[in-house]
Amino acid sequence: MMKACYFGTYDVDQPRNSVIIEGLRENGVEVVECRVDLWQDTMDKIKSIQGGFLNPRLLSRILISYFRLLKRYARVGDHDVMVVGYAGHLDMFLAKALTTFSKKPLAFDAFVSLTETIVEDRGLVHPDSFLAKLIYLLDRSACRLADLVFLDTEVHIQHFHEDLGVRLDKLRLVYAGAGNVYRRQLPKVNEGGSFRVLYFGKYIPLHGVNYIIEAAKILEEHDDIQFELVGKGQTYEGTVRLAEKLDVKNVIFHHTWLKAEALASEYIQTADVCLGIFGDTPKARRVVPLKVFAAFAMGKPVITGDSPAAREALVDGEDALLCEMGNAQALAQAILLLKRDRVLRERIAQGGYASFLQKFSPKAIGAMVRGYLDELC
């Protein structure tokens, strides 16, 4: 049996990590997790990065965490391969030293780049700043240290090759997918008979939640359509202000982020349509997010932006309905189409569920990753 050491300061609540770990175990790989906490949460990570990597307090925190990580690694025992979990860009330097000493292959789940997330999409660091250049160098160095690098779309693979200079022969596709907590169940009956349109997420810019609010305003005359937005994050306050400015009456905000189990049972299960992403940004065109695959897993029809990444992974009208990105009118028309055409709605829901089982479930993703690790071993 292959034994993999899943290594680093990765977030255990990050679905990307749990999907790959679940999937590897379902494909006969013994996964030993060797991790410690470095960040308290996403906001802690953002504040630390904005303060600069040369901050003495941050450096001290990193050194203490890595000392603890070394102690845990000493108890892992023999293994065939090391995988650094997302987002382990800083972890790659220690991982490379350990795998060089032990002569083990090293895989890195980059997933997405720090530059496009922190600098380009979220705008948390000025593009011309020294910190932005340092983040770019960290992106590039982390990938170059790995024997294989996992990314979520072919569009991202080209981006890493062209913008970061990472060799194509070490880049591998691993879809985002969704965990086994999302399971198709008998649908709950909606109280009041409304047609429920659901967004859930952390309000990052690429989600384009403002277009969802604008689409809700366009559909306001359809008093049986109800929008529900679950979560909170970077653009939440701006989104609420936009809803107030437009005086939107058909939107309900649930501003607390839920654990996956509650999100699945309380919101996704009762939704008629789930929404993906609609932001008109470079990163939005390169990703297909977990929310799409979670809805697939629960047999819900999905509307998401028509992007190169979406065209790569999805089939318009078969397992998802794609609409023009950054266009509230197009989103509104797509929602109306699914509301009025029950046959299309059910076909897309069934197609999404079939695609999930075939390509986006932990077992399917674990089989992809197992194949890549077999290459290394």
Image (cartoon, helix red, strand yellow):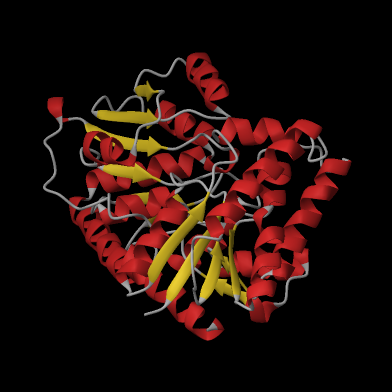
Residue 1 in view (yes/no) = yes
Residue 336 in view (yes/no) = no
Which residue corresponds to the image point at 59% horizontal and 30% vertical from the top-left? 43
Q: Which of 330 and 30 is in front in this view?
A: 30
Residue 54 is situated, as x and y percent measured from the top left of the image, at: 83, 39
Which residue corresponds to the image point at 66% horizontal and 34% vertical from the top-left? 46
Which residue corresponds to the image point at 43% horizontal and 62% vertical from the top-left? 32
Residue 16 is situated, as x and y percent measured from the top left of the image, at: 46, 54
Q: From the viewer's perspective, is residue 226 above or below residue 118?
A: above
Q: From the viewer's perspective, is residue 228 above or below residue 317?
A: above
Instruction: Using residue 134 as the reference point, say whether residue 233 is left or right of it.
Output: left
Which residue corresponds to the image point at 49% horizontal and 35% vertical from the top-left? 202
Q: From the viewer's perspective, is residue 130 above or below residue 71?
A: above
Number of labels in the image equals 0
Residue 339 is situated, as x and y percent measured from the top left of the image, at: 25, 43
Question: Which quadrant would residue 158 be assigned to in this image?
Answer: bottom right
